[in-house]
Image (spheres, rainbow, N blue to C red):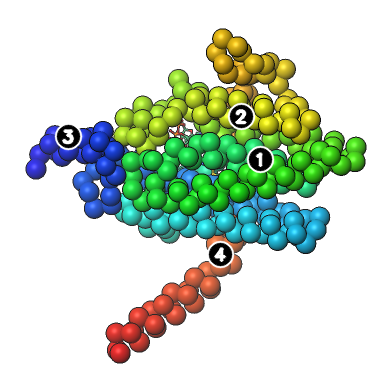
């Protein structure tokens, strides 16, 4: 069939909300941009384990430790579903990991900030997982089938993560003066980086036009960021805390909160690898990959042996 016809059938499917599956014909650019986004998303989940992993051994109680451990394990699971979804587009996991380690592939800017206090576990759950869900609920309806299906389970787990983060902050917000100060400080440090998670302004977003046409994305970066600000500006009142933005105020005409300008220079610096923890994060991932080599080899050898046994039987 001619490419023009194939493209028409493909776009008709998208327009009629039929999922695109791995064996369906798809334009090269659709394959590429899905591979880019899904693999970056997978990398974000895996690198995202590091800032919180840093606090597992220092959690203030056994209960908090168990919850944090489970949350960090959930993130590993999300990474695995997403790598598996990305592999259906024809790239090997080894290649994706190599792209991460060499700095060719991106991951979310947010994970390049340090976790300085226990309150950061609360702020990450509430703000970072909160921003992640805001963006990811639309991805449960994304046009590429394996990505959409992976996102359904991920979103359920992320909403638990967000509530556990808020609860950590709620406890601190009712605690001693030092605990209240710790809570406020974490909110101040994580607020702007959380807003950056939604990506550049719509006018600067190079991928959005095609991603919207192909229903990979269904809401723009600015639209989602606004929804997030509207939600958090209300929730912060329950904590009796404030967000570090003097321009934040309800706009009755727009029925949305107005808010200040993101430091875009900082955003691009972090995306380009010059954030506070970029080098540390990549070094930790490379070390884990090297040190885990024997486990991967042993697991592969075991799987091959089992397969041989089954075939012989
Ligand atoms: N950081 O044209 P756009 C999580 C790049 S998961 C770094 O607007 P697009 C769970 C972008 O890649 C968090 N780079 O791009 C968790 C592009 O460069 P490229 C991750 C960024 O794709 C919680 C360029 O800028 N979530 O948190 C960022 O249409 C707690 C131009 O941008 C996802 O990955 C950024 N913040 O929209 C885990 C969700 N923003 O690739 C552990 C899926 C933009 O052309 C603990 N991804 N860039 O070289 C998406 O929805 C989209 O990819 C966006 C960006 C919205 C992130």
What residue is disc 1 on? 126
Task: Give the camera-side residue of 241 and 288.
Answer: 241
* Above/below status of 183 relative to 297: above
What residue is disc 2 on? 231
Does any portion of residue 279 appear in the rendered image? no
Asked which secondary structure carries label 4, the reply is helix
**Pointers 3 and 2 in contact (C-beta within 8 Å):** no
Among the two numbered marks 2 and 4 on one chain, the one whose residue lies closer to the N terminus: 2
Foreground: disc 2 or disc 4? 2
82 sits to left or right of 171: left
What residue is disc 3 on? 8
Q: Quadrant of residue 69?
A: bottom right
Quadrant of the frame with the C terminus: bottom left
Task: Give the camera-side residue of 58 and 92.
Answer: 58
What residue is disc 4 on? 290
Using a 10 Å C-alpha cutoff, classify the residue at mark 3 as few (fewer than 14 neighbours), some (14 to 19) or many (20 or more): few
Image point 60% across, 39% down: which residue? 130
Per the model, the C-alpha gap separating discs 3 and 4 is 46 Å
Foreground: disc 3 or disc 1? 1
Does any portion of residue 18 appear in the rendered image? yes
In the rendered image, residue 53, in percent from the top left (x then y), is placed at 68, 55
Using a 10 Å C-alpha cutoff, classify the residue at mark 2 as few (fewer than 14 neighbours), some (14 to 19) or many (20 or more): some
80 sits to left or right of 126: left
Is label 2 within 8 A of ligand 1 (CB to nearest ligand atom)? no
Per the model, the C-alpha gap separating discs 1 and 4 is 33 Å
**Pointers 2 and 4 in contact (C-beta within 8 Å):** no
């Amino acid at each position: 069939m001619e490419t023009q016809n194939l493209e028409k059938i493909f776009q008709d499917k998208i327009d009629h909300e039929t999922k695109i599956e791995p064996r369906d014909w798809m334009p090269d650019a659709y394959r590429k941009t899905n591979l880019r986004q899904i693999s970056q998303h997978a990398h974000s989940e895996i690198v995202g384990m590091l800032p919180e992993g840093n606090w597992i051994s220092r959690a203030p109680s056994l209960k908090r430790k168990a919850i944090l451990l489970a949350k960090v394990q959930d993130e590993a699971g999300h990474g695995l579903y997403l790598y598996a979804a990305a592999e259906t587009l024809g790239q090997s996991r080894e290649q994706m990991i190599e792209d991460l380690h060499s700095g060719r592939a991106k991951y979310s800017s947010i994970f390049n900030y340090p976790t300085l206090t226990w309150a950061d576990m609360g702020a990450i759950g509430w703000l970072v997982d909160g921003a992640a869900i805001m963006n990811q609920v639309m991805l449960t309806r994304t046009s590429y089938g394996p990505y959409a299906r992976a996102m359904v389970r991920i979103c359920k787990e992320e909403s638990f993560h967000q509530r556990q983060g808020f609860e950590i902050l709620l406890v601190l917000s009712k605690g001693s003066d030092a605990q209240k100060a710790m809570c406020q400080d974490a909110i101040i440090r994580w607020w702007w980086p959380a807003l950056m998670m939604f990506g550049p302004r719509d006018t600067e977003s190079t991928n959005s036009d095609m991603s919207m046409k192909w229903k990979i994305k269904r809401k723009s970066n600015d639209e989602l960021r606004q929804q997030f600000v509207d939600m958090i500006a209300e929730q912060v009142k329950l904590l009796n805390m404030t967000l570090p933005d003097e321009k934040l105020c309800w706009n009755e005409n727009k029925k949305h909160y107005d808010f200040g300008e993101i430091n875009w220079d900082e955003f691009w610096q972090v995306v380009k690898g010059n954030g506070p923890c970029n080098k540390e994060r990549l070094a930790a991932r490379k070390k884990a990959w090297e040190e885990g080599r024997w486990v991967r080899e042993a697991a592969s050898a075991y799987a091959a042996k089992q397969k041989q046994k089954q075939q012989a039987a």
